[in-house]
Every structure is written in structure tokens, then in C-alpha cells.
Image (cartoon, rainbow, N blue to C red):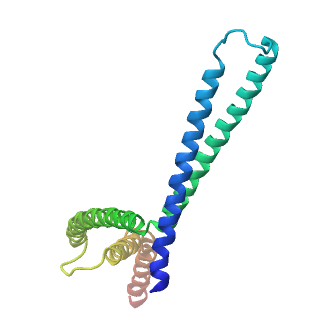
Amino acid sequence: MAQQRALPQSKETLLQSYNKRLKDDVKSIMDNFTEIIKTAKIEDETQVSRATQGEQDNYEMHVRAANIVRAGESLMKLVSDLKQFLILNDFPSVNEAIDQRNQQLRALQEECDRKLIALRDEISIDLYELEEEYYSSSSSLCEANDLPLCEAYWRLDLDTDSADGLSAPVLASPEPSAGPLQAAAPAHSHAGGPGPTEHA
């Protein structure tokens, strides 16, 4: 409990130091810039010569310009320290940013799910129509029973091949059979011819 109480106190002290640095740097920039403007005025004759006064004013302007640059660099370093402090210690803002990002991702996930569901429905409808078209075309190619498309084409090829094999011998059969029939007829007539002569 002591550490939890000391932690906010250290944060408060750190924020107070940041605030003091900011005020000091801004005050330094304003004071040095005001003094540079004052130095740019042309004054009346004094005991110091104009050349000496000019060199002194030039040196003062360089010093005050360097102070302004140093204060500006200190402010830039302060900005970097504040960013680091917010990143490391501002847990509510970090949690809020994480919650917002989670909500955005959930919304994106729901949108993707809706699109995927709609795409699935469209694909299922198209697939159903394609199946109906497929089975109607396969039933026209096959017999009464429903066969797969590959088996229907296979049987159709077998029927075509068997029809070609049966038609080829029928067309070629009269040519070789004409020789024996023609040869048998003279033999029969020749055998019958000598019979009656020999019987007589």
C-alpha cells in the first residue's frame, strides 16, 4: 500500500517539475527576445564610443540568441519527456485506445462474417442449380437408372464400340462366302452328271 501511495506522489512531483521547466523556458525566451529588441535601439551619445557599444551589443545579441536556442531545445526535450510519460503511465488512455481498436476489429469481423455467409448462400444456390442441370443431362444420356456422368459416358462408349464391331463382319461376310458357294455348285452338278451316265 505504501508503494501504491508513493507512486502517485512521484507522478505529481514529476508533473510539477515538467510545469516548472515549461515556465522557465518560456520566460527565458521572452526575456532574451525582449532584451534583443531593446539592444537594437539607437541610443544617444555616451561616454563609450559607438564602435565599442556596437561590439558590446553584438556580443549581447549573440549570447541572448544562444539562450533562446537553448530554451527552445529544452522545450523540445520537455515535449519528448511528456510523450514518454504519457506512453508509460497513462494507462486509462492506453486502455481506451485498445478498447476502441477492439471495437473496430469486431465490427470488421462481423462485416466479413456477413459477407462470407452471403457468399456461401449464393454458392449453394448456384451449386444446387448446377446439380439439377447435371443430373437432368446425365439421365438423358443414360438408361432409366441414374448413373454417374463418367459411367454413363463409359457405357455409351462401350455400346458404340460393340455396334461398330458387329456391323463390320456383316458387311464383309458376302464376299468370302461367295467363293465356296460358287465352287460348291459346280461340284454338285459335276457329281450328279456322271451318276446317271454311269447308271445308264
Find residue 42 and report its image quarter: top right
Rendered location of residue 160, percent (x, y)? 35, 71
Residue at figure coordinates x 43%, y 88% from the top left = 198
Q: In this view, does 59 lie to the left or right of 93?
A: right
Please state which of residues 180 and 198 is positioned toward the viewer in this rendering.
180
List the single residue furthest toward the bottom.
199
Vertical position of residue 157 compared to residue 197: above or below: above
In the depicted structure, whether residue 14 falls above or below residue 25: below
Left-right relation of 2 to 156: right
Q: Which of 33 and 104 is in front in this view?
A: 33
Q: Given the current orientation, which residue lies at the most extreme front position?
A: 47
Residue 3 vs residue 154: left or right?
Answer: right
Residue 155 vs 44, above or below: the answer is below
Q: In terms of image quadrants, where is residue 52?
A: top right
Position in image of residue 50 (x %, y %):
78, 12
Numbered circles on residues, count? 0
Q: Please, which residue is most extreme toward the top here?
A: 45
Q: Where is residue 120 in the image (x, y as percent from the top left)?
A: 26, 67
The residue lying at 41 percent from left, 81 percent from top is: 188
Which residue is at a point 64% across and 36% down the rendered structure image? 68
- Residue ID at (38%, 88%): 200
Quadrant of the snapshot with the N terminus: bottom left
Residue 94: % across, % down: 42, 65
Work out whether residue 88 or residue 175 is closer to the camera in this orientation and state it: 88
Q: Considering depth in this image, is 42 or 123 the residue closer to the camera?
A: 42
